[in-house]
Image (cartoon, rainbow, N blue to C red):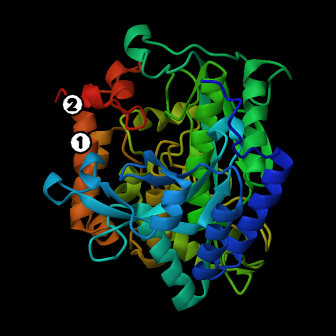
Amino acid sequence: MSGMYRDFLEMSYEELEEKNLALKDERKARTDIGKLQEARLKDLTDTKGIKAVTVLFSDLEGRLHMLDYDRKFLVGSYDNLTFDGSSIRGFTAQKESDLRLGVDWSAFYWTPADVFGPGKVIVFGEVIDKNGSPYAADLRGILKQYAGEQFKSNGYTLNAANEIEGFLFDGVDAEQSFIKTGSFEYVNGGGYYHSLPGDPLREFIDTSAEIQRAMGFENEKDHPEVAPSQFEINYTYGEVVAAADQIQLYKLICRQVATQMGMTATFLPKPVTGVNGSGMHTNVSITKDKKNLMFDAAGEEKMSKFGWDFIDRILTHGNDLCLLFNASVNAYRRLDPHFEAPNQIKASATDRGSMVRIPLGNEKSARVEVRSVGPDANPYAVLYSVFKTGLDGETSTIENLRQADRYLPDNIYTAIEDFRKADWTSKLLGEDVKTRYADLKQASADRCAKLLGTIVKTPEIQYHHDVYNQLLWGQF
C-alpha cells in the first residue's frame, strides 16, 4: 500500500537521544509515578503522528512479549488492559487465564522509526494478579517491588550493569534453520577487538550502538569479542529495574538490526564448540545517600565488609542459583574451564574462572561482578536473585568459603536437582513459581540429549527458550 497519505512520527537520532535521556533523568530522580503518568498521557495526546504504543513484558523464562495498542485506545483504557495469561508459558492455567497488564510510566521510550516502525513508542508493562498485587511469575514486577522496599526501608539504591555478549551469524533465522544446516556460519573470522571498518560485524555493531545511544543507553564502549563473529556493546550503570529493561532492549535491538542486515544475532551461551562462549557478566553495587557501600579504601581488595558479606552469601547459594543464571541446556557448554569459564564457586580479584570477581575500583566504581551468568537468562530473575541473595541470603560455615574447591554443575540436570532441593530458591521465588520454572527447564532438558558430548546438538537449539516455536512445542 502506498505511504503517500501517511504522516506518522519519525524523529532524528539526536532528538531521540535528548528526549530519552530526559526520561531517564526523571526515572533516576524517582519522580512521582502520578506526575509521570500525567506527562506521558499528555505526550501521547499532544504529539502528532503517534499511531500505536508497544507494551513490553517478559514471561517466566525471560522471553520478551510485545503488544501494540492503538494510541487513542491506550489513552482511554490504560488502567484496564487485560490479556490471556494461559497463552504465556509459565503464567496461569487455562481455567484462570485472565491477567491485567499495567503500564510502568517510568519505563517509556521514544523509538527510532527505522527500527520499531514510524509512529510507535514503547513502554514496559507490569503483570498484575487478580488481587491487584504484582503477579508472582512476572519477575520484573517482583524485582521492582523488592528494589522499592530496599529503598524505602534501608535507603538502598540497587545498581547494575551487564556486559552482554552475542554472536552474529549469516542468514535470517539461523537458529531456526539449525535443524537443516547443523551449523552456524560466521560473518567475520577475526577475533578480540579485530574488525575492519566496513565489514558486516563492524556495521552491525555500529548500527546497534547508534540505536542504543538514541534510546538513552549512554554507551561506553563496543568491540568484537574473543570468538569469531562475537560482539559486546557496553553501556552505563543504571538502577536495577532500568538496567534489566535495557538488557531486554539490547537483545531486541541486536536481533532486529541483524535481521534487517540479513543475519542473525544470537544469545545462545555456546553456539559453536571450540571457541569461547557468550556470557552476561553482571556488575552490581548498592548506594545509600550517594555513597557506594561496596567500597572501603582499607578493606581487602578495597571491598567493604558489607561488600564481602554480600559476596559470601552469593557463594553460599552458588549451586542453588545456577539454574537461574544458566537457564538452558546449551548454557552448560559454556561452563567449560578450557574457555575462561567462570565455573569455580569462589571469589577473586584476578582469576577469571571465579564465579565472582572483584574488579579494580574506586569509591565510585567499586562493585561485585557475577561472571557465571549466561546471556539467555531472564535478566529480572538474575538481578532479583543476585540482590536478594546478597542482602538476605545465608552464609555458609564451610572453611575457606571464598576459595573453596567447589564447582558449578556441568549439566542442566544437576542444576535442576540443586534448584529443586534448595530451601533458598523456595524463599526466593515461592514454591509455586519455583516449581513452574523448574518444570519448564525439565521439559526442555528432556527433549535434548542427556549427555552434552563435544558437538552442539540440534535439540539444544531447537528447544531453546529464545527460539520459541509454538508449532514444534505443540507436538508434545
Residue at the image point whose x is 47% and y is 38% from the top: 335
Q: Nearer the viewer, mark 1 or mark 2?
A: 2
Residue 222 seen in the current view: yes
Q: Earlier in the sequence, mark 1 or mark 2?
A: 1
Residue that protrudes farthest toward the left in the picture = 95
Residue 232 seen in the current view: no
Residue at the image point whose x is 37% and y is 14% from the top: 179
Using residue 102 as the reference point, say whether residue 429 is left or right of it.
left
**Position of residue 77 measured from the top left corner of the image (x, y, whole percent):** 45, 66
**Position of residue 330 measured from the top left corner of the image (x, y, whole percent):** 41, 32
The image quadrant where one finds the N terminus is top right
Residue that protrudes farthest toward the front in the picture = 5
**Position of residue 318 measured from the top left corner of the image (x, y, whole percent):** 42, 58
Is residue 23 placed above or below 35 in the rendered structure? above
Crowd around label 2: few <14 · some 14–19 · many ≥20 (10 Å) = few
Q: Amino acid at mark 2?
A: Gly
The image quadrant where one finds the C terminus is top left
Using residue 264 as the reference point, say whether residue 318 is left or right of it.
left
Residue at the image point whose x is 23% and y is 29% from the top: 447
Which one is nearer the viewer's eye here, 454 or 267?
A: 267
Q: Amino acid at mark 1?
A: Gln
Image disc number at residue 474:
2
| Tag 1 residue | 442
Using residue 149 as the reference point, say whether residue 307 is left or right of it.
right
Which one is nearer the viewer's eye here, 173 or 360?
A: 173
Which one is nearer the viewer's eye here, 144 or 111?
A: 111
